[in-house]
Amino acid sequence: MQPKLLIIEDEEIFQNLLRTFLAHNYALSIAGSGEEGLVKATDWLPDLIILDIILPGIDGYQTCEVLRANDQTRGIPILFLSQYQGLADRLKAYGAGGDDYLSKPINEQEITLKIAKILQHKRQHDQLTAQLQTSYATVITAQLQAAKIQFIGRFLQQILLCDNFEKLTELFFYTAQQLGVNCVLYIRGEQPLIRSSTGGIHKLEHEILELSQNVGRIHSFGQNRAIFNWKNLSVLVRNVDDNIDTFAILMDALEVGVHTVNTLNNLLKMLENLHHQNQLVKDNIDDRFKEMNQALKQTFLSLSFIDKLSTDDEDLINDRIDAFNHLIGQELRHLDNNNEAICVLVDELRSQTKDCDDLGNQTDKIGEVTFF
C-alpha cells in the first residue's frame, strides 16, 4: 500500500506541481487551508504532511502547533514548504514542530529525496517504539510474575507453621486473592473440607469437586475455568486467566501444607497418647508398689516373723524396702520428667499458629511492588 501524503497548500499551481511529482508513488490528499488540513489530518491520518506557511485563515506555524497538540496527529512528520529561505524562518518552523523545511521553487529530486528520508526515519522510529513497548510489557509481565512467585514463597513459609486446616485455608485464599484468582478448595480426608474464596459454594461446584479426582491433574474447561487435582486436594478455579502455571506452583505449596497439618496433628495425637499412657504406667507402678509393701507387712505378720526378729533385723528390712522405694521413686520421677517434656513439646507445636499469624501480617500486596 502506498504511503499517504497530505498536502496543505492554497496555491493551485503548487498543488498541481506536487501532484505531478508525487502521485505515482504516494496516495495524495490536498487541503487548501490550515483548517481544512486539520480536519483531513485527523480523519485520514497520513504518513506525512507537506505544509505551506502562508495560508488563508490560520498559517502553517499555527496549523503545525495544533497538529502537535493533538494525540492523533502528534507523531505525523511535517515537511514545511515556503518561499522564505532565511534561518529565522527555518527556526520558527522547527520551533512550531516541523521535521524538515523546503524552500520554493520546488525541485522534484530534492522533495522526493526529503520525503523518502523522512518516511524512512518514521518507520525506524515506529519500529523502535514498538520494540520499546514490547520490552516494557515484557518487563512488567516478568515483575508481576516475580511478585506472584514471591507471594507463593511467603505462603510456603507460613504454612510450615500452621497446625490446623482453618488457618491453612485462610492463608491459601489470601494468597489466591493476591494472584487475582477466585476459587473453591476441597481437601480430601476422613472429614472432607470445602471452602470458597467468596464464602458461597454452588451445589454444582460441590458435586464437580467430589467427582473430579479422575479428570486429570489440570483440566481447563468452559469460560476461563479449570480444575487442579493434587493428591490430598482439588481446587476449582472460576477465573484462571493466564495463571495456570503460577497456580500449579501454589497447589504444590498447598499440598505441602496439607501434608504438614496432617503430620503435625498425627504427631500431637501420638504425643498426647504417650503422655496419657506414661501417666497410667506411673500410677499403676505406684499403686502396685504400695500394694506390695502392704502385702509384705501382712505376710510377715501372718508368718509371725515380726516377733522373731530383732530390732536390728527389722531396721535392716525397712532399710531394704526404703531403698527399693527410693529406686522406684527415681524411675517414677523420670516418667514425670518425660511427661513434662512431652507437654512442653506439645505446647511449642501448638504455639506455632501464633508465629504463622505474625508472618501473615507481614505479607505485602502485588499492587505495592515497585516496577522499574
Image (spheres, helix red, strand yellow):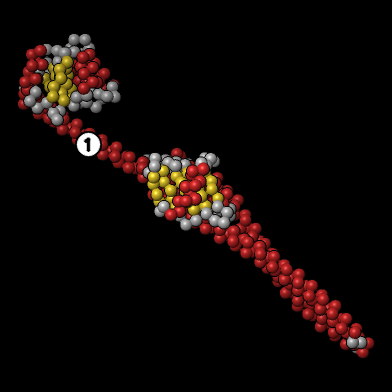
108 versus 123 height, above or below: above
Query: Is 319 situated left or right of 126 in this image?
Result: right
Residue 185 to residue 127: above or below: below
- Nearest the camera: 322 or 275? 275
Furthest residue to the bottom?
308
Residue 150: % across, % down: 44, 48
Task: Name the quadrant containing residue 281.
Answer: bottom right
Q: Position of residue 169 (x, y in %)?
A: 54, 48
Instruction: Work out whether residue 265 can be spotted.
Output: yes
Q: Residue at x 47, y 47 (%)?
A: 208
Where in the figure is residue 174, as x and y percent of width and height?
51, 44
Report the label total: 1
Q: Quarter of the image holding residue 124?
A: top left
As shown in the figure, which amino acid type bears the numbered disc 1? Gln
- Is 270 in front, or is 325? 270
Q: Is residue 287 left or right of residue 154?
A: right
Residue 157 pos. (x, y %): 50, 53
Quarter of the rendering occupied by the C terminus: top left
Quickly name the residue at label 1.
Answer: 127
| Residue 157 located left or right of residue 42 | right
Q: Secondary structure at mark 1?
A: helix
Residue 7's place in the image compared with 352, above or below, is above
Residue name at image x 93 percent, y 87 percent: 307
Question: From the viewer's perspective, is 200 left or right of 314?
Answer: left
Q: Residues within 10 Å of mark 1 (few under 14, many from 20)?
A: few
Quarter of the figure that contains the N terminus: top left
Residue 362, visible in the rendered structure:
no
Q: Which quadrant holds residue 33?
A: top left
Residue sitting at x 24%, y 37% = 128
User: Along the line of sight, which residue is nearer the eye, 236 or 115?
Assistant: 236
Residue shown at the point (47%, 42%) measured from the top left: 182
